[in-house]
Image (tube, helix red, strand yellow):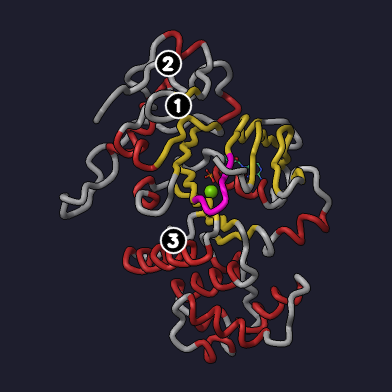
């Protein structure tokens, strides 16, 4: 395997005031040009993991251990100037709510110009670059968009503007945190197709975060499944979908609507809710919801281990399916 673009090792994120663990001992890497999906229910630590990569953890939480190696530097200990230059230039992020990234009282063109300027880019042809970026993301009238404010656009169009903003400095890694969750299905498909096309064209790495396993099926090379702050399974997209080894992943798959199901209703779902990560201790966090759980699962922590199909943290793997 080629040298990773970014390597996250034993990342742990906790609350600052009362030291509750929110992300627990997470390790993974992303290769140049590789697309990785992170899947898990709400609260599993996906967003905090992503924000750690950008040095943007919110107030009240901090990384208590681990390292994030990018370009020979540890992003967890890098100074603000280094992080600021890496953000946007090297690693860019798109969010569920485009207004996280957009300024409501500034014209869209000016906002993208500002991104180019703030990273010391060549501004002589900045307007042209912005118009090209708008047309690349499928905005029908780039000149009009340039002179518009965010509120003059629909949610789907704002999402496209945010993608243009994220891509304008040609980052090596694009992090997407549920950017299509709030959109209707048709627009969602259009945005996914757009991101896939741009990724191929630029050979950019991607980290795609979603609570919906179905979204990443045709989008990524590798899938990471998180549960209660930990990684419970990692594998190629093919193996995760055909031979999931962790009962949690198998449960997520079983709850996906089938293409053959006209109403696309969810027939099965995993009963119960995930525990708070800091309450789990030395046990498998999924054990209270798992039909395979026994005494061992309730009294010791399964570690992520390599198996025939995937890497999984489970004492009772699902076994061969194919
Ligand atoms: N600023 C914060 N202060 C305290 N707890 C937080 C903060 N942000 C997130 N959390 C908690 O950390 C856990 C993981 O959150 P998050 O990474 O947002 O999960 P996900 O993105 O998978 O839904 C959740 O239990 C959440 O409530
Ligand atoms: Mg989140």
CA distance separating discs 3 and 2: 35 Å
Where 59 falls versus 203 (above or below)?
A: above
Residue that label 2 marks: 315
Residue that label 1 marks: 312
The crowding category of the residue bearing disc 1, from other C-alpha atoms within 10 Å (few below 14, some 14 to 19, many at least 20), is many
Determine if the C-beta at disc 2 is less than 8 A from ligand 1.
no
Decide which of 90, 141 is in the foreground and name it: 90
The crowding category of the residue bearing disc 2, from other C-alpha atoms within 10 Å (few below 14, some 14 to 19, many at least 20), is some
Characterize the magenta stretch by its predominant secondary structure: loop
Which one is earlier in the sequence, the residue at label 3 or at label 2? 3
* Identity of the residue furthest to the front in this view: 2
Find residue 125 and report its horizontal and vertical position in percent. 68, 87
Which image quadrant is residue 316 in?
A: top left
Find residue 200 and report its horizontal and vertical position in percent. 46, 62
Q: Residue at x 61, y 67 (%)?
A: 170
Residue that label 3 marks: 180
Q: Residue at x 59, y 67 (%)?
A: 166
Which one is earlier in the sequence, the residue at label 3 or at label 1? 3
CA distance separating discs 1 and 2: 9 Å
Is 129 magenta? The answer is: no
Which contiguous range is marked in magenta?
A: 29-34
Q: Secondary structure at mark 3?
A: loop
Where 236 falls versus 190 (above or below)?
A: above
Q: Residue at x 67, y 59 (%)?
A: 90
């Amino acid at each position: 395997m080629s040298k990773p673009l970014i390597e996250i090792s034993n990342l742990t994120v906790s609350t600052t005031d009362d030291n509750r663990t929110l992300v627990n001992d997470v390790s993974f890497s992303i290769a140049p040009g590789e697309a990785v999906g992170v899947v898990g229910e709400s609260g599993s630590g996906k967003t905090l993991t992503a924000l750690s990569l950008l040095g943007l953890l919110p107030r009240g939480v901090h990384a208590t251990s681990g390292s994030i190696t990018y370009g020979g530097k540890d992003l967890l200990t890098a100074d603000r100037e280094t992080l600021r230059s890496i953000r946007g230039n090297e690693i860019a992020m798109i969010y569920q709510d485009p207004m996280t990234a957009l300024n409501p009282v500034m014209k869209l063109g000016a906002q993208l110009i500002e991104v180019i300027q703030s990273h010391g880019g060549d501004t002589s042809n900045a307007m042209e670059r912005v118009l090209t970026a708008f047309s690349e993301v499928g905005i029908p009238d780039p000149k009009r968009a340039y002179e518009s404010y965010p509120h003059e656009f629909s949610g789907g169009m704002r999402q496209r503007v945010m993608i243009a903003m994220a891509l304008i400095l040609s980052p090596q890694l694009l992090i997407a945190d549920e950017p299509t969750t709030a959109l209707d299905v048709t627009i969602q498909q259009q945005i996914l197709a757009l991101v896939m096309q741009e990724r191929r064209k630029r050979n950019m790495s991607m980290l795609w975060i979603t609570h919906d396993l179905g979204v990443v099926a045709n989008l990524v090379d590798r899938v990471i499944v998180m549960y209660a702050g930990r990684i419970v399974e990692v594998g190629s997209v093919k193996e995760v979908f055909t031979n999931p080894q962790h009962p949690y992943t198998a449960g997520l798959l079983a709850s996906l609507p089938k293409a053959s199901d006209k109403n696309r209703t969810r027939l099965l779902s995993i009963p119960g809710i995930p525990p708070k990560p800091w309450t789990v201790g030395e046990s498998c966090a999924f054990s209270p919801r798992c039909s395979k759980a026994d005494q061992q699962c309730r009294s010791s922590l399964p570690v992520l281990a390599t198996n025939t199909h995937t890497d999984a943290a489970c004492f009772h793997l699902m076994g061969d399916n194919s």
